Amino acid sequence: MRKIAISDIHGCSKTLKVLLDKQVGLTSDDELYLLGDYIDRGPDSKGVLDFIMDMRKQGQVVRCLMGNHELMMIESREANKESTVWRLNGGVATIESFGTSTVASIPQQYFDFLYSLEDYILVDEYILVHAGLNFEYKGNGKAKKDFLWKIKNPFLDRKSLFWLRNWHDNIDRDWLGNRVIIHGHTPISSYDIQKMNHNLEDLPVLDIDNGCFAKFQAGMGHLCAYDMTNRKLYFQQNIE
């Protein structure tokens, strides 16, 4: 049995299926951990959600995190109006993949799935989050201006779990212990992902977002899977 992590699928259903079938060779005994951003930008967000839900129905162990794009979709539906930020970041493509013109017309079953998404996952020696963990934050700018306060439990800063960037230098090694943080959200090159995996003993964090949707950008345009059991990377070129 292997434990496989994938992040930032972004509506690329064909690429996801080929990655799991041809590259990873996923079996029914394996466990799949998806780190958020299943929707937006790519052409088939609905297909990605259908595929994930179908795998679960067939008995595959699939645990799923909330990404910032799922959060924007939920907030748009709750406000009964698509936010401009969401539309500019792929929300239009998601709505169109459902063959409708408004987020309110998307069937309830998909929102039931979105509301079930987890904020973070602890598995073996790994901490799985979508974006990052906020180990430090600035004071209120008044009496304690510019003083850095430790957050005793980084999981309590929910916004950072979905949105944080540029946080690797602030990792609290004492809090982390011998664990490794796996995340997505910030696209980096395949070379940088491989380098991070090679250097986990020095910096125990791995970003597995290879910018699948950015297929015309050098070093990007692949969907990455990480075999946490064997610390092995797989890359599938975007075929959408």
Image (cartoon, rainbow, N blue to C red):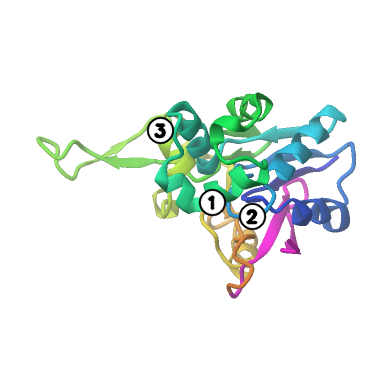
What residue is at 57 percent from the left and 36 percent from the top? 66
Q: Quadrant of the C terminus?
A: bottom right
Q: Is residue 187 above or below residue 111?
A: below
Residue 30 in the image: x percent, y percent? 84, 39
What amino acid is found at the position of numbered circle 2 in the picture?
Gly
Residue 71 tag number: none
Q: Are marks 2 and 1 in contact (CB under 8 Å)?
A: yes
Disc number lying in front (1 or 3) = 1
Which region is colored magenta?
Answer: 218-240
The residues bearing labels 1 and 3 have C-alpha atoms spaced at a distance of 25 Å
Q: Quadrant of the N terminus?
A: top right
Callout 2 crowding tier (Cα within 10 Å): few <14, some 14–19, many ≥20: many
What residue is at 76 percent from the left and 45 percent from the top? 229
Q: List the residue tagged with mark 1.
A: 90
Question: Is residue 131 in the magenta section?
Answer: no
What residue is at 55 percent from the left and 63 percent from the top? 188
What amino acid is found at the position of numbered circle 1 in the picture?
Gly
Q: Is residue 48 visible?
A: yes
Q: Earlier in the sequence, mark 1 or mark 3?
A: 1
What residue is at 61 percent from the left and 62 percent from the top? 193
29 relative to 230 in the view: left or right: right
Residue 143 in the image: x percent, y percent? 9, 35
The residues bearing labels 2 and 1 have C-alpha atoms spaced at a distance of 8 Å
Residue 42 tag number: 2
Question: Is residue 227 in the magenta section?
Answer: yes
Q: List the residue tagged with mark 3.
A: 157
